[in-house]
Amino acid sequence: MSPVHRVYNFAAGPAVLPLPVLEQIQRDLLALPGVGMSILEISHRSRAFAAILEEAEADLRALAGVPDDYRVLFLQGGASLQFAMVPMNLLGPDEVADYIDGGSWAAKAIEEARKFGRVHVAASTRAERYARIPAQTELQLSPGAAYVHMTSNNTIEGTQYRTLPDVGGAPLVSDASSDLFSRPIDIRRHALVYAGAQKNMGPAGVTVAIVRGDLIARSAARRAALPTMLTYAVHAEHRSLYNTPPTFGIYALGLVMKWLREQGGLAAVAARNERKAARLYAEIDRTGFYRGTAARADRSVMNVTFRLATEALEARFVAEAAAAGLDGLKGHRSVGGMRASIYNAFPEEGVDALVEFMREFERRFG
């Protein structure tokens, strides 16, 4: 059999998966070892799937050092559903929630939360087109806030928190969809972390929420007023098995967790991600032919955004790159330009190939 041709996938998500994971899925897809059925066929109530779920959670906990008083929930609906679930479960009628508006997805979370309660925007860089993360000195936090919500990495604008904001004693809720498990994370600093898996953790279709016990209790207190499927406490009580969960997504996520552990854990993965990003930013900054769009201090390690002199030149860059096997480089439709998403599984040689292409493109059009 001839080798399969694979392009370099710079898409923001669903994103590249580790090749060993894809190969194992391919081997096991017809029949899981010792089961005789595909992961796509087995019951979510079966012993086989119970073992898959437990192992995925155990590896996830080991990688991130998740404390025992936090629950790991495997949900559906992506981060966009969490924009609603968070205030529905955690924001009381007489309370206010603080939101840090540092990007387009934070703005969407704010818009959704306002449907369920009082929202205070603690800081915003919208006027600067979200080119940077709000500074600590800009935060105007509400006394006794139900929680403070942040977005750890902005896929559209290419910015990322390097250190967590100080929110005092308020519970910190983080949408970490595009950088969870790309680097070490101090779970204790968070009350709730959620992420769609399709960037660094697995395929689209499964959402991970890591929730502190007191927030599960807060959810339980509001249970009678909430739809059952949108209640954290219900999913915690049933260990993510209240209804049929995304079985294939959880299985694949478990394989990615094992792969991450084999790479040396999150510190080793972070070091490789930093190398990839540094190489690409160095090329962007080399002559000025390319222009980075994010403030240098807040540049994302996951999503590298840049522009050229004209939109016509950008369109040519994207088209020629795709023809060269460098796919998914077109920036988000709301901002234009280019975006190279270089998540955990994106290979270093792919960054080298892009840098080589950028130099040749500059030679021809610079």
Image (tube, rainbow, N blue to C red):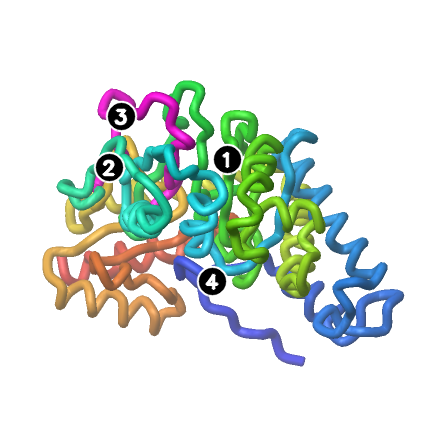
Q: Nearer the viewer, residue 15 or 120?
A: 120
Contact between marks 2 and 3 (CB within 8 A): the answer is no
Q: CA distance from mark 2 to mark 1?
A: 23 Å
**What stretch of residues is rendered in magenta?**
131-154
Q: Which residue is mark 1?
A: 271
Pinpoint residue 157: horizontal percent, then vertical percent. Answer: 27, 48
Q: Is residue 140 magenta?
A: yes
Task: Say if mark 3 contacts mark 1, CB within 8 Å.
Answer: no
Question: Which residue reaches farthest bottom?
Answer: 1
Name the residue that disc number 2 marks: 132
The image position of residue 92, as x and y in percent, is 43, 37
Other residues around mark 3 within 10 Å, as few (<14) / some (14–19) / many (≥20): some
Could you tell me how far apart the alpha carbons at marks 4 and 2 are, in whole angstroms?
Answer: 25 Å
Q: Earlier in the sequence, mark 2 or mark 1?
A: 2
Label 4 with label 1: CB-CB less than 8 Å? no
Which residue lies under the disc numbered 4? Answer: 14
Residue that lies at the very extreme toward the left in this rendered image = 310
From the viewer's side, name the closer residue of 183 and 84: 84
